[in-house]
Amino acid sequence: MIKLYLVTGFLGAGKTTFLKNFIRQHAQYRFKVIVNEFGKEGIDGTLIKESGAQVEEISNGSIFCSCRLDQFENALSQAVNDNPDIILVETSGLSDPSGMETILEHTKRFESITYMGCVCLVDAVNIKKVLTTVRVTKKQLAAADLVLINKSDIASEEALLEAESLIRQNQPNATIRRTTFGRIEMDWLKDIRDNAKNNEGPAYHLKDVSLQKMLIVINDTMTNKQLHSFISMFIEDTLRIKGFVCLEGQLSLVDCVGAHLSIEPYQGEATHCNSIVALAGAGMSMEKSIRQAAEWYPKGIEKIEWD
């Protein structure tokens, strides 16, 4: 049988880092990873390929949305044909994963898959803000068998206790663990389905119109310092900003979560460059802030559009 783990969680909670750690800790097994990106251009798949795993990317929407479900099922069927030991499915931070079990059970194509459970990562610092602005995060918690409170090293004990309380309000049955840098102990995965829930939702979901997603194309004449200043002007009105940029001869990864701005040199290769995706939830004035910031750099920004 092929084991399948569903990895879900909040925007910027550390899912990609978790997957890379998981693959390293199971180096004796053959993996197939299906990565779901909400934007048109994938970032996580590029990062996960560094671990040597086979990666299939599904971009521009949730794999559980009616517009991407066929593509996901085909990718899952191909993964079965490749006969790996473990399939890892990383959903977008904007996906409702409650239909996973329904998908696996509704066709004989997936009879060789054993569903091992859903691991949900949450950000210890930003959990309250994300729960308030992104409705689907409550469904991610509801579907979880194991919840990892990541980045616990930069959160106070009071914040961690509040995070645990918020998780329990949405998922009283899941096992909760605190961690840092997406690390996982193998014992944490044992018997996580013992408290399995009757959480089989419909196989597909309709698009959540409250979610905001914008694509920003950067001109390569912009400097790294200008990019840093540009993003800092609107970062407070976003939940997540990510993408690869190549400025001043240096390839860098833009990876911002909440108000934390990160632009770091990247040593690998990137297929898409100088396009960054910004995500926000309901009621956040992201578009207005981005366009106001762009006015300061008319030559540095080539395009801003809804993604």
Image (cartoon, helix red, strand yellow):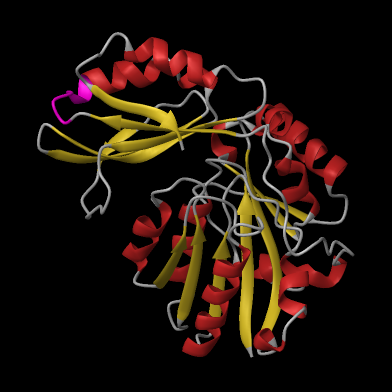
Q: Position of residue 211 (x, y in %)?
A: 62, 34
Image: 236 above or below 214? above
Q: Which residues are magenta?
A: 220-225
Image: 284 above or below 200? above
Identify the residue at horizontal 55%, vertical 76% (top origin): 74
**Residue 239 is drawn in which quadrant?**
top right
Per the picture, the main secondary structure of the magenta-coloured stretch is: loop
Does residue 255 appear anywhere in the picture?
Answer: no
Question: Relative to the observer, which residue lies in front, 293 or 71?
Answer: 71
Q: Tell whether position 224 is magenta.
A: yes
In the image, is 201 to the left or to the right of 135?
A: right
Image: 187 above or below 135? below
Q: Position of residue 72 (x, y in %)?
A: 57, 68
Name the image quarter holding the N terminus: bottom right
Does residue 273 appear anywhere in the picture?
Answer: yes
Q: Position of residue 307 (x, y in %)?
A: 46, 38
Identify the residue at horizontal 25%, vertical 52% (top origin): 270
**Residue 275 is drawn in which quadrant?**
top left
Question: Relative to the observer, which residue lies in front, 18 or 257?
Answer: 257
Q: Position of residue 90 (x, y in %)?
A: 55, 60
Q: Tell whether position 128 is magenta.
A: no
Question: Relative to the observer, which residue lies in front, 76 or 55?
Answer: 76
Identify the residue at horizontal 22%, vertical 55% (top origin): 269
In the image, is 5 to the left or to the right of 164?
A: left
